[in-house]
Image (tube, rainbow, N blue to C red):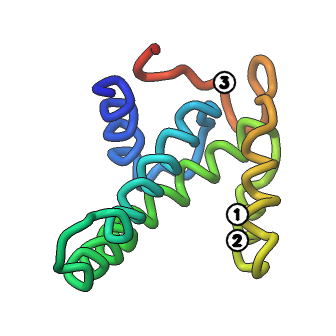
Amino acid sequence: MEEFLNAYVAEIKKYEDFSGRSTVKQFWTVIGINFLISILPTVVPFGGGALLALASAIFLLIVLLPTLAVAVRRLHDTDKSGWFVLLNFIPGIGFIILCVLCSQPGTAGPNRYGSAPVDVVKA
């Protein structure tokens, strides 16, 4: 678990970096931890759900920019433009299409967006 948290923190710290490339593992680590934290208010069995929901919403606003950055870098690894991240604005299916694009294997070796990415933390 500590490996995932370290990988997550490493990606969050690169919040302003929309250039370069990210691995599938880096992308899904960020998406997965953000998802787990965002559903926390629905699975916590005690009162204060509204406060937890507010905290979850604030958290998601805080990690919005780093999440967009890792998605753009992941698209770069598949040799696609980062502008594909705008697929999120298509209701219903946009996020699914983006996830499929980000799940594809990256380009072997360097591409127009830089050299192949390296995982910060090895599993």
Q: CA distance from mark 1 to mark 3?
A: 21 Å
Mark closer to the observer (1, 3): 1
On the rendered image, what quadrant is the N terminus found in? top left
Q: Amino acid at mark 1?
A: Val
Q: Which residue is mark 2?
A: 88
In the rendered view, does 56 fall on the left or right side of 99? left
- Residue contact at pointers 2 and 3, CB within 8 angstroms: no
Q: Amino acid at mark 3?
A: Ser
- Residue 102 on image: x %, y %: 73, 45
Q: Amino acid at mark 2?
A: Asn
Front residue (pair 36, 23): 36
Front residue (pair 61, 83): 61
Q: CA distance from mark 2 to mark 1?
A: 6 Å
Circle 3: element type: loop
For the point 46% across and 15% down, which residue is it?
Answer: 123
In the rendered view, does 111 fall on the left or right side of 32? right
Mark closer to the observer (2, 3): 2
Q: For the residue carrying disc 2, how many other residues have a C-alpha within 10 Å: few (<14), some (14-19), or many (20+)? A: some
Front residue (pair 99, 77): 99
For the point 20% across and 81% down, which residue is it?
Answer: 51
Q: Which residue is mark 1?
A: 85
Q: Earlier in the sequence, mark 1 or mark 3?
A: 1
Circle 1: element type: helix
Q: CA distance from mark 2 to mark 3?
A: 27 Å
For the point 35% across and 63% down, which residue is it?
Answer: 43
Q: Earlier in the sequence, mark 2 or mark 3?
A: 2
- Residue 60 on image: x %, y %: 39, 69
For the point 66% across and 23% down, which residue is it?
Answer: 116
Q: Which mark is residue 115?
A: 3
Q: For the residue carrying disc 1, how many other residues have a C-alpha within 10 Å: few (<14), some (14-19), or many (20+)? A: many
